[in-house]
Amino acid sequence: MKRTLSLLYVGLALAGATHQAMAADPAAVLKTYADIAEAGYSDSVTTAQALKNKIDSLLANPTEETLQEAREAWIASRVPYQQTEVFRFGNAIVDDWEGRVNAWPLDEGLIDYVDGSSYGDMSDENALYTANVIANTSIQLGNETVDTTEITAELLSETLHEIDEIEANVATGYHAIEFLLWGQDLYGTETGAGERPATDFSLENCTGGNCDRRREYLTVATDLLISDLEEMADNWKEGGEARVELVEKGEKGALATILTGMGSLSYGELAGERTKLGLMLHDPEEEHDCFSDNTHNSHFYDVLGINNVFQGQYTRVDGSVVQGASLADMLRSSAPEVEQQLSTELSETQAAAQAIVDAAAQGNTFDVLIGAGNTEGNALVQQLVDSLTTQTRSIEKAISALELDAIELEGSDSLDNPDMVING
């Protein structure tokens, strides 16, 4: 993994030279942006289908080997998807849909058994904190009894997902599948991820109870993930709803959408909610891929997604490249000093994300790095926060240089009101 990421990083350095001769036409920039979105979501479909194949193999023969292969397929499926997160903010069609596939953090006790000594048995905010759908054919919500006898797509997506209007009641998407494959990570800020045994999926040697229902839940959730991703991939095809909405905004409105996505992911979402918050609290529960300890990769590919959009270049899972006119091209001709500064800062942020990937390869995963008293690890994570914050200021300069209307980027209390976070 380290070698692959490094090669991608080198590719970023070459992107500017590749595009120098390309026309900085706004319509061409928007086409590249939409082409990259289509490719990224299509790749997400492909890797989710590969994940399903490995899960089918796991269920046919539940061994530690087939479980590990399913886990590796899940990690691989995150590579293209995380690069699409830059399309969220500014594209309402994506942001309204995103919670179905990537909602986090989640109260995993809604789905399956948990370790009560670390998780607890109740929550003042969530009546279904330990509902354990897999173990129960009905769950109680106030005076209402919810029938969970049949684990179906409708039950997970329409009834259980964010039930009782609580965002932590996540029943679908990557992280529900992640929890089912890994189980809880009970190591806190020490080295170690979830250790669910393969026998949790065995019909003959069942551990954890209700293995038949756990198998059903995993199958249904994986099928839902694929269908949801297919929907978004179709939205970005020629004539798709996402492309149509982008064009209808006009050139300046569409360019503003691109920069809104870059800036909001960079600052409020990634620097703030996914990185600084966990660092401030030294809390692994704020880790994005908390069951698998894959957060270092998720952050890396989020950063890469921002670079992709700015440079107009995306490397697909099959190795082919989608590229074209870009924001970097536009700025290079109209505000070269802004383009140079932002390109440099984006590369520096990618290097900061790479440093966290390198640390994880040595066993120092994100949850270890944010641990209280880990001065060196904390500093490594803070460097990513600082780099993301710095590049966001240059994204704002790009907005001004392109004479776009004022854009409100996503913020985060962890960055803007840290006392509120610390003092509750």
Image (spheres, rainbow, N blue to C red):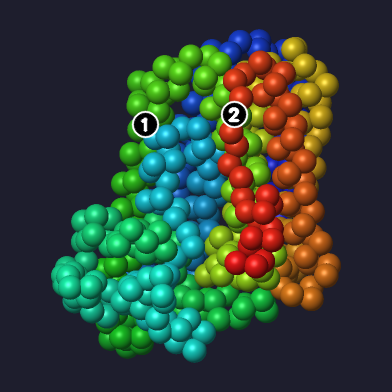
Task: Classify the position of the N terminus by image quarter.
Answer: bottom right
The residue indicated by pointer 1 is 235
Amino acid type of the residue that numbered disc 1 sits on in the rendered structure: Asn
Whether residue 338 is situated above or below residue 106 in the rendered picture:
above
Of residue 96 and residue 122, the one placed in the foreground of this image is 122
Task: Classify the position of the C terminus by image quarter.
Answer: bottom right
**At 23% across and 79% down in the image, what residue appears?**
136
Q: Is residue 386 left or right of residue 302?
A: right
> Residue 148: percent from the left, percent from the top?
19, 70
Which mark is in front, 1 or 2? Answer: 2
Res 373 quadrant in image:
bottom right
The residue indicated by pointer 2 is 407
Q: CA distance from mark 1 to mark 2?
A: 24 Å
> Residue 216: percent from the left, percent from the top?
26, 68
**At 49% across and 76% down in the image, what residue appears?**
184
Residue 140 appears in the figure:
yes
Of residue 389 and residue 405, the one placed in the foreground of this image is 405
Amino acid type of the residue that numbered disc 2 sits on in the rendered structure: Ile
| Circle nearer the N terminus (1, 2) | 1
> Residue 98: percent from the left, percent from the top?
42, 46
Q: Tell me the element at label 2.
A: loop
Whether residue 225 is situated above or below residue 234 in the rendered picture:
below
